[in-house]
Amino acid sequence: MKKISLALTTAALAFTATTASASCDSGERVVKFSHVTGGTTHPKVVAANSFAERVNKEMDGKLCVEVYPNSTLFGDSKELEALLLGDVQLLAPSLSKFGSYTAKYGVFDLPFIFKDMDHAIRFTQTEKGQELLTVMDEYAGFVGLGYWMSGMKYFSANKPLIVPSDAKGLKFRVQTSDVAKQMISAMGASPQAMSFSEVYGALQTGVVDGQENTWSNIYTKKFYEVQDSVTETNHQLLAYLFMTSSEFLNSLSDDDREQFMRIANEVTQEANLNVKAAEAANRENILKAGGKINVLTPEQRNEWVETMKPVWKQFEDSIGTETIEAAAGA
């Protein structure tokens, strides 16, 4: 039986990707899981390692999952191409990355559409939410295995952001999401798309003035060190599409595919239940490390909501009215 040593840990990042394959037994099919997040406490890291542990134990002798965190195998600009080429079999990119494949996932980026993570989880379990898992299969060969919640997003900048107009003239890092770009523009700021791995350096050198992220990303990547403060806007959801390719799924036997999918579903449910606790802990970690958090009054938050309302209308046709209504009303 193989030793279950699944991920390149922080201490092992100096080794090449090839080193990780040593944990798999001869004859087992190696399944490479690449993601861009580092540390040990981030919800994506915990979920990825949990999935690998489950598969490597319960499907021992059949499949062996290797986890490559912190962009050690592929960065977020190359991972989708790598999945299509079969160089990697599992990913967990942000839902904001799929704009060139489908506009439907833009529903997750709409500002203030979800009140909290529980609201977002309810939507993913609706018929519309489940339909979105396979929306890219027919023409791109991507298949969603589940939605991994990471938390709600908050704005940080090199100055306090209390009302949207405080962001006027600033440059904000965003993901490659048209919705996110329009949201930043609605604040009178300039959106700058860039890879996650580049954000800390860009904030530190002033290439961008601010960013939006969850407590876990802000803490584990130490963004609070190079920003004046974080504003608790709770404006948007950050979620990942735990995904594979239809080619990989179809290559499994019926029994193996059923077991693989069952493990994926159970890990997803468990991961989402644990996110709120992790987010609350990392919020406190930011404060303990000397970071500053701006808490909005109801009136100030309402000003943010009103500023963002026109963004929904801009994407009604591309996302679909029914999908937006299903998300808002879940």
Image (cartoon, rainbow, N blue to C red):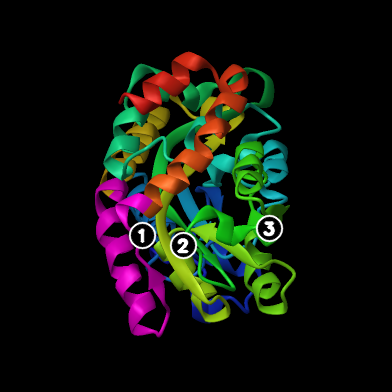
Residue 15: quarter of image:
bottom right
Comparing 21 with 321, the one in front is: 321
Pick whichever, 286 or 150, lies toward us.
286
State the predominant SS element of the stretch in magenta: helix
First to last magenta residue range = 271-299
- Label 1: how many residues lie within 10 Å, few (<14), some (14-19) or many (20+)? some
Q: What residue is shown at x 60% (from left), y 69% (from top)?
A: 19
The residue pinned by badge 2 equals: 162
- Mark 3 or mark 1, earlier in chain: 3
Q: Quadrant of residue 254?
A: top left
Badge 1 amino acid: Leu
Amino acid beneath label 2: Ile
> Which disc number belongs to residue 296?
1
Q: Residue drawn at (33%, 22%), measured in percent from left and top?
A: 126
Q: CA distance from mark 3 to mark 1?
A: 29 Å
What residue is pinned by disc 3? 195
- The residue positioned 30% from the left and 47% from the top of the image is 272
The reply to whether residue 278 is visible in this rendering is yes
Q: Where, by quadrant of the figure, is residue 268 drawn? A: top left
Q: Nearer the viewer, residue 302 or 56?
A: 302
Q: Residues within 10 Å of mark 3 (few under 14, many from 20)?
A: some
Residue 278: % across, % down: 30, 62
Tell me how far mark 2 sits from mark 3, CA to CA: 27 Å
User: Considering only order in the chain, which callout, 1 or 2, is on the residue closer to the N terminus?
Assistant: 2
